Image (cartoon, rainbow, N blue to C red):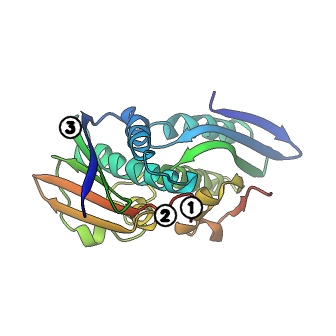
Amino acid sequence: MKKINELKMVFDSRSVNESFSRVAVAAFSSQLDMTVEELGDIKTVVSEAVTNCIVHAYRDTIGKIYITCTVFEEGVIRVSVRDKGCGIEDVTKAREPLYTSLGGDRSGLGFSVMESFSDKLKVRSKVGVGTTVTMDKKIKGKAQ
Amino acid sequence: MPVTLKNKNSTLYAFLKGEIDHHTAPELRECIDDAIILNDAPKLIVLDFGGVTFMDSSGVGLVMGRYRLAASKGKKIRVDNLSERDYKIMKMSGIEKLAEINKTVG
């Protein structure tokens, strides 16, 4: 696939940035002629991935979250959300629906929601090093 | 206030507004929980999502947590006016087995 445009951003893992990050990615993505639903899908995936960085990766600390958003010629958008936090010991288990390592009001649906709203979701993680979640989505657009 | 509360016919209505994510959920949770704890009479709590413009899985956590609190007091929860997308996210949790959830009509 041939890259035609790319956005990179780095921001603090503060919860107030959840809204900022999904809106920023959506604004950049909107150069593709996508539907309101497709834009909503991207916002939801970014929101889940960034929340994971804040709640799990950096837990009670503040670290940096790195987002790369790439637009490919074929109308595919790739969003990669990376942290340098604690990492996930068992990625397969973390991706199970309703699994959460934290209690309270966490639903344990983060990865299920990300999978459901993207075409491909890749999770790479190393304990003590960090996690990268990459989602690919083919934009069918308003013409579909 | 992101929540407007109304008490009518033994039902407590909570009209939610704006975006629900991990950042905004705590304030919503506090408002709703205070209302549930302070108003003993209503046996049904309706969470109305008609004014919600965005929700991720934090919205599911919000409903599940309120379900647990309500159930511990012998009360029921119903969720109204979910958008197509929010309804889909809610259903991933299986919450519809515990509480009635409804999409926006029309």
Judge whether B95 appears above or below A22 on screen: below
Q: Which residue is mark 1?
A: A143
Indicate the chain on which mark 3 is placed: A
- Using the rendered view, name the quadrant where residue B34 is placed: top right
Q: Are marks 3 and 2 in contact (CB under 8 Å)?
A: no
- Mark 3 and mark 2: span between their CA atoms? 32 Å
Foreground: A34 or A53? A34
Which residue is most to the right? B9
The quadrant where residue A111 appears: bottom left
Rounded to the nearest whole Å, what is the CA distance between mark 2 and mark 1? 7 Å
Q: Nearer the viewer, residue B10 or A129?
A: A129
On screen, residue A4 versus residue B75, left or right, reads left
Q: Residues within 10 Å of mark 1 (few under 14, many from 20)?
A: few
Quadrant where the N terminus of chain B is found in the figure: top right
Name the N-terminal-most of marks 3 and 2. Answer: 3
Query: Circle 3: is it few (<14), some (14-19), or many (20+) Cα within 10 Å?
Result: some
Q: Which residue does the numbered mark 2 point to in the structure image?
A: A140
Q: Which residue is mark 3?
A: A64
Task: Please say if the residues under marks 2 and 1 sit with CB atoms less than 8 Å apart.
Answer: yes
Viewer-side label of 2, 1: 1
Q: Quadrant of the C terminus of chain B?
A: bottom right
- The location of residue B23, given as percent across then percent down, is 44, 37
Tell me the residue at 67%/52% (across/down). B73
Give the amino acid at mark 1: Ala
